[in-house]
Image: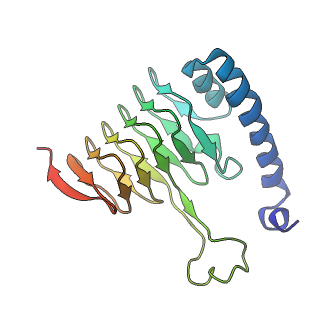
Amino acid sequence: MKAIDETGAKKTIRFVLYVFYEVLIHRIISHLLYFPQVRKFSLQILGSKIGNDSIIMDVKFFNWHHTGPKGLKIGDRCFIGDEAMLDLYDNVTLENDVTLAQRVLVLTHMNVGYKNHPLQKYFPKVSKPVVLKEGCFIGASVTILPGVTVGERSFVAAGSIVTSNIPKESVFAGVPAKLIRKIK
């Protein structure tokens, strides 16, 4: 199994355990109870840091077997909307008062395939953390690429693709996202 050879036994076991978590806790228990606090509590048990009054709706996580839940840091009073997807290959940090609307995709890595994939020499595997600074808003269906920091109190319009850092107190929109105006 090529995937196990490249990933290693330890990460493969972690992958199996997190798939079990995803199925048992996230899909069955939290859907039966449908309380965002169940998701928050289960993530905290697994090592995530989640602040007070934060709400985590039906969020999907992937690449658990790399950085995993311990790489997820969510501040106070944050909201993550339904069908958001967070890549836990590297760290994802949401400071206080961050809002992620529905279907936001946060990527922390890029990999075209196995080590011998013909495109690896042109597009080598990369992973970088994503940081969403205090008070920023990320609109519905926004994609945030690896290594991006969104500045304090910035607004990213729905459907945008964020390829580079966004300064504080800015409105960005588009594909790729570009400065529309400063807030102050």
Q: Is residue 88 above or below residue 22?
A: below
On screen, residue 101 versus residue 105, left or right, reads: left
What x and y, as percent, mark residue 147?
45, 60
Question: Farthest residue toward the top?
Answer: 33
On screen, residue 40 versus residue 45, left or right, reads: left
Q: Is residue 38 above or below residue 21?
A: above
On screen, residue 100 versus residue 136, left or right, reads: right
- Name the residue located 79 percent from the left edge and 67 percent from the top edge: 6
- Name the residue located 61 percent from the left edge and 54 percent from the top edge: 89
- Name the residue located 68 percent from the left edge and 17 percent from the top edge: 32
Q: How many numbered marks have been drawn onto this rendered protein structure?
A: 0
Between 47 and 81, the residue placed more toward the observer is 81
Snapshot quadrant of residue 116 = bottom right
Which colouring convention does the figure follow?
rainbow
Between 95 and 159, the residue placed more toward the observer is 159
**Image quarter of the N terminus:** bottom right
Snapshot quadrant of residue 39 = top right
What x and y, as percent, mark residue 168?
24, 49
- Name the residue located 40 percent from the left edge and 37 percent from the top edge: 101
Between 10 and 138, the residue placed more toward the observer is 138
On screen, residue 32 versus residue 184, left or right, reads: right
What x and y, as percent, mark residue 79?
43, 30
Question: Farthest residue toward the left?
Answer: 184
What x and y, as percent, mark residue 80?
46, 33
**Image quarter of the C terminus:** top left
